[in-house]
Amino acid sequence: MIVFAWNCRGIGQASAIRDLRALIRTSSPDCLVLLETKVNPSSMQRILLQLNFPSHVYVSPIGLAGGLCVAWQEGFDLEPIAMSKNMISLLVFSASGIQPWLLSAVYGPNSYSQKRLFWDSVGLEAEKFSGAWLMIGDFNGVQSSQDRSNNNRIDAGSKFMKDTLDHIGMLSIPSSGFYCTWSNHRFDSGRSYSRIDRGMANEKWWELFPNAYLKILPQYSSDQNPLVLYCFGQQVFSWRPFRFEAAWVEDQQCGWVINQAWLSCYHPRPPTNLLHRLSATQGALSKWNKC
């Protein structure tokens, strides 16, 4: 099973739908987790039908804020068991003989008081559920000082989140691609990055999917990076060597593409930061060259 998760910051715009369609085409997910959709139920259903995801559950936004959706393709059996403005939980049944497991789409709250209430409720749910459990989405909190580019302090809400996740035995899913998953889209000394989107699972889920792997994609129309979870391991693609074409420098867009890609990711360790930025620039130039 392949799960695609993205805080799209509004799915009603044509640019967001276009980006989502392209992302679905390249990642081929079986399940979509869309956060902060900001559209009404009828619009959400219309968009999902256009994307060939006929089954879904949806928590509508409150005013212009929020909105959570989990959608899946035919051939998959998901049963919703709990829904709130911050999390949708579903049991996933597999025809391949794998025991049912719990999928929770997370949209973490902003304020400390709301975070405390939410993660308290997650801890209580964990006491009632003893099976395999996957959580994926925008947790709206960091797990360490390295998850932020410009602030070594972990805020109280993030600390409470981390303590809860540790207490219920959630482990981070290994990832590749970009390290941080959110940026403030500034291109000066005030630019900020953080790692707030992630996938986490308990030990029983890892027993079912020991090769699970998370790919963090570049940013598109949102200020947050999409996630692609491969439950059965990293997908293998044909590889072609990257070559920088001298003719590209004659195109004014080339410099803009390089600058956007270079500033789109951050890692606190300089060598790793350099590798991430080179990889992002290579990918952006390859994509731009195909346009």
Image: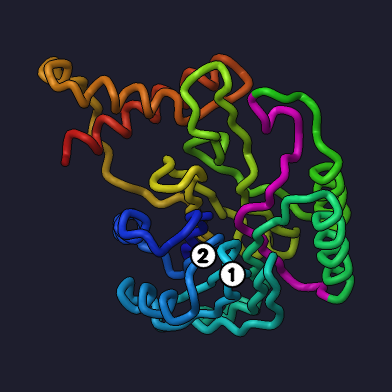
State the image coordinates of residue 66 (x, y, percent, origin top left).
Answer: 60, 63
To which residue does mark 2 refer? 38
Please state the extent of the stretch shown in magenta in the rendering.
Answer: 129-149
Q: How far apart in space, not on screen, are marks 2 and 1 (Cα)?
A: 6 Å
* In this rendering, position of residue 225 left or right of residue 53: right
To which residue does mark 1 refer? 61
Q: Quadrant of residue 147?
A: top right
* In this rendering, position of residue 265 left or right of residue 54: right
**Please, what is the three-letter code of the amino acid marked with disc 1?**
Pro
- CB atoms at circles 2 and 1 under 8 Å apart? yes
State the image coordinates of residue 149 (x, y, percent, origin top left).
Answer: 64, 25
The residue carrying pointer 2 sits among few (fewer than 14), some (14 to 19) or many (20 or more) residues within 10 Å by Cα, namely many
**Please, what is the three-letter code of the amino acid marked with disc 2?**
Lys
Name the residue at 49% across, 45% down. Answer: 225
Q: Quadrant of residue 159?
A: top right
Q: Is residue 32 above or below residue 186?
A: below
Instruction: Tell me, yes or no, whether the highlighted magenta stretch contains residue 147.
Output: yes
State the image coordinates of residue 132 (x, y, percent, origin top left).
Answer: 71, 69
In what element is the residue under mark 1? Answer: loop
Picture disc at residue 40: none
Name the residue at 82% across, 73% down. Answer: 130
Instruction: Tell me, yes or no, whether the highlighted magenta stretch contains residue 166.
Output: no
State the image coordinates of residue 269 (x, y, percent, origin top left).
Answer: 62, 18
Pick the quarter of the image with the C terminus: top left
